[in-house]
Image: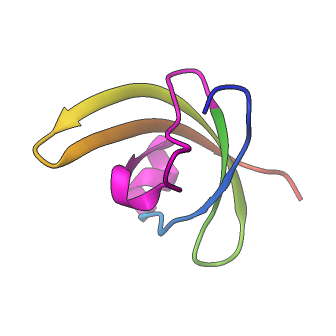
Amino acid sequence: MSGRSATYDIELSPVARQLGVTYLHDVDLIAGQEPVVGDRLVLRDEGLAFWDAEVVALDEVRLGHKYRLHIRRRSD
């Protein structure tokens, strides 16, 4: 996906918000637009707040990939 920005709807736990880290899995992604390390994404949480995210790691899991994201809430 490198170079493009996409918005993903995601449920963020209180711990993820506090630590500034969350994960996306292959099933959460738009087919053919898998991100790579360094890509920047936009997340929209269940309260419709927007978060800036950067892909910092790609982990192999049993059924595909898991993308580790560093997140920061956007200022209103």
Residue 40 lies in what quarter of the image?
top right
23 vs 20, nearest the viewer: 23
14 vs 63, nearest the viewer: 63
Magenta stretch holds residue 31: yes
Residue 53: image x %, image y %?
62, 40
The structure residue drawn at horizontal position 89% and vertical position 59%, both measured from the top left corner, is 76
51 vs 27, nearest the viewer: 27
Task: State which quarter of the image contains the N terminus.
Answer: top right
The structure residue drawn at horizontal position 58% and vertical position 21%, both measured from the top left corner, is 38
Q: Which residues are magenta?
A: 14-39
Magenta stretch holds residue 69: no
Report whether 26 appears left or right of 7.
left
Figure check: 74 above or below 27: above
Figure check: 13 above or below 63: below
Q: Report the number of discs.
A: 0
Q: Residue furthest top?
A: 38
Q: Residue furthest front?
A: 32
The structure residue drawn at horizontal position 16% and vertical position 49%, both measured from the top left corner, is 63
Say how the picture is coloured: rainbow
The structure residue drawn at horizontal position 28% and vertical position 40%, both measured from the top left corner, is 65
